[in-house]
Image (cartoon, rainbow, N blue to C red):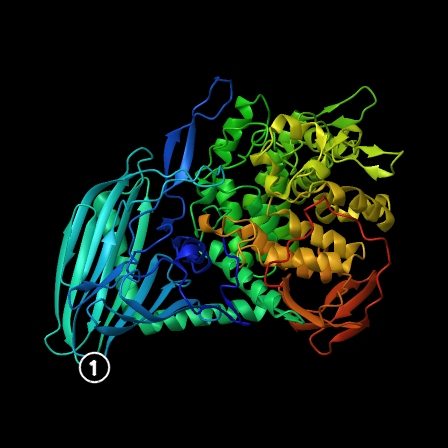
Amino acid sequence: MITDRSYAVEPWTVRETALDLGVLAQSESVFALSNGHVGWRGNLDEGEPHGLPGSYLNGVHEVHPLPYAEAGYGYPESGQTVINVTNGKIIRLLVDDEPFDLRYGRLVSHERVLDLRRGVLERTCEWTSPAGSTVRVRSTRLVSLTQRAVAAVAYEVEAVGDRSRVVIQSELVANESLPEPDGDPRAARALKSPLEQEDDFASGNRLRLVHRTRRSGLRVAVAADHVVTGPERTTTRSESGIDVARLTVTSVLEPGQTLRVEKLVAHGWSGARSLPAMADQVDAALAAAAHDGWAGLLAGQRACLDDFWAGADVEVEGDEEIQQAVRFALFHVLQAGARAERRAIPAKGLTGSGYDGHAFWDTEMFVLPVLTHTAPRAVAEALRWRYNTLDEARERAAQLGLAGAAFPWRTIAGPEGSAYWPAGTAAFHVNAGIADAAARYVEATGDTDFERETGLELLVETARLWRSLGHHDTHGVFHLDGVTGPDEYSAVADDNTYTNLMARQNLRAAADAAERHPDRARHLGVDEEESAAWRDAADAMHIPYNDELGVHEQHAGFTRYQRWDFDATRPDQYPLLLHFPYFDLYRKQVVKQADLVLAMYTCGDWFEQEYDEEQIARNFAYYEPLTVRDSSLSACCQAVVAARTGHLDLAYAYTAEAALMDLEDLEHNTRDGLHIASLAGTWMALVAGFGGMRRDGDRLRFAPRLPERLRRLAFHVAFRGRRLRVDIGADKVTYALLEGEPLTLRHHGEPLTVGTDEPAVRPVPPPVRRPAPAQPRHRAPNAGGGR
């Protein structure tokens, strides 16, 4: 666990100025590089010491049987686990026959810098070997955002003080040894030697290995090419064998002389292509990378990120830590989805093997809202991945006796991978999340081609699921019984409010989209009767409410449960799921993560229209003392609703928790990979919370207010071909349209049209003052040890 600040607070970099082997695994996650297709953990160049070696290709996994004490109909038979593919990062160094190993000799200095504008990880260190030879090592690493298959390393060694004989070994290594899991169910299942070798090649400066997974039958090819620059008589030799291909570079360096190796690495995988085809594929990717060269890759990376930051940057004045954290968050969210291209965006991105590399509802409900307004192309590709798994989702629905499509709770390739059905299969709300993401994307972009070709079918099949899952009672009220909402401490309950409200949106969105595309809807078998049934179910949807307390129930009957005994719960007994049986959690008023509170964010307009802001405030005050935040997904949701209800200081504290989740390892599991959804939640907390941004169909609404700790907040939003900048101060806000046609929006309910000719300035009204709600004992917001 990171107990002291490990990284300097700087606006555009994450800088580690000393090497602490005790937190090496956490820093490997923080310094991970990815483009959504290729992921390289921030392991040291020489490979050892390491916390968790990690090289990932999105979608490459192994399958394994799921054991059950008792068999049951509909239980998934196989699990899927992301695997560590062939590692192309490794560059080993020997200095006068001594291995460059930071555990030995004397480490004079060591610095690593993640540059968020250039998209590179830089390392500089000076080391004296046990024999007294001193060298200075510099490396720069990138995973290309412009060339999907390519990653690269530039590695340079300089002799310091004395003449040194140096040997660089640049390697491709498969089936690396992985540490055993520590028993935490959130950690990935380590699979030993999952790759079977099919081909190895070494010639000149070119290396290549091709493997195939033992059970899932996926073919993986990784190749590398090198440019070597050094003194005269520098020699190279290449070789390959089982699981290793190596280029060895040998040179003698006089003081001040350097040896430099530029390594280009290409990756590819397929479940169908032949071995020769895969070898040709990675060779071609290397040729394209070599055409640009190292300098071209650097330039392309910077240009791509310049374009991204021009439309996505968030500026924070008054808190340097949150300023750094939100840019760190946006960078990693972009990396998770930039080139995923019809593959999943896993909960950890490609930064670690936590959660077995699975994708959850996190993608659609936390990550895609950010990308919708910052990098919308990535959203369309992520939803096309869901579309490509529709057949598996239809099969799962049929297995459960339902119509439409039942998307999996957790998966890599499409089939359900959750062995615990109360928190898996019963969490049907994932289907509404996918529908919501599709509708949100179309509203924000106007991409009607996507809606017709992809979005409509997602909406139709998920609507069919809700209509078959629910039923009308004798009074005509529509119910969804036996479901699990976002709060996994309240499983298999009736009429979860979040699920019902999201399903209602789903049903109406499907009916509306079918009307917009009648010919395509007819092709999908949608007729007027089915569309009308969806609207009837939506209109009659039951939303549980306790009249005596004046609050909405998280699910029917929730407010009559016994409250959890928070006073008798020690601080070391959180998260509760690791210390108490689920049976006890399921029958108490205790909330793992925002559920009803999340509904007030995602469906806030309904609460506002059917009730008022006071109702939202009462709901928030009721659920805040019950919510223990045993999930990293919770703080950002609570921040948004806290800001909406005028609790700006509380919202600020929750924003800090979401923002610093990984930079300060607040949940003690950053070693397994970053919390991508919590990182995305940093943007949500700032933009939807303090910026008050809300969906209003094909328009936007804002209700900005800042906490006292922040002097200024500015952010950019992409919407319907426009780029809007919102700049919020303590008492006024400026809306500036940077490009596109005039945009009509609402500011605290007031209609406002903004054009590119002149910004619009409006006052910021003070918040309504309400008593601050309490949190469960020992569960106040965790704003990090450095604050």
Q: Give the side of residue 342 with respect to residue 592, left or right.
A: left
Image spot of residue 780 (x, y percent): 69, 50
Q: Is residue 478 left or right of residue 260?
A: right
Q: Residue furthest left?
A: 233
User: Where is residue 180, by image quadrant?
Assistant: top left
Residue 696 appears in the rendering: no
Residue 766: name its quadrant.
Answer: bottom right
Q: Nearer the viewer, residue 583 or 122?
A: 583
581 or 238: nearer the viewer: 581
When the figure is inspected, residue 73 is found, relative to residue 701, above or below; the finding is above
Q: Is residue 22 above or below residue 406?
A: below
Few, some or many residues within 10 Å of mark 1 (<14, 14–19, 20+): some
List x then y, in percent, for residue 461.
59, 34
Q: Residue at x 44, y 43 (%)?
A: 357
86 or 588: which is nearer to us? 588
Query: The residue under label 1 is which amino acid type?
Result: Pro
Question: Would you name the residue on which mark 1 appears?
Answer: 255
Q: Is residue 703 visible?
A: yes
Depth check, front residue: 755 or 692:
692
Q: Position of residue 231 (x, y in %)?
A: 15, 78
Left or right side of 326 for 416: left
Q: Position of residue 398 (x, y in %)?
A: 54, 24
The residue shown at (60%, 39%) is 573
Q: Quadrant of residue 482?
A: top right
SS class of the residue under badge 1?
A: loop
Query: Is residue 268 placed above or below 732 in the rendered structure?
Result: above
Q: Quadrant of the C terminus?
A: bottom right
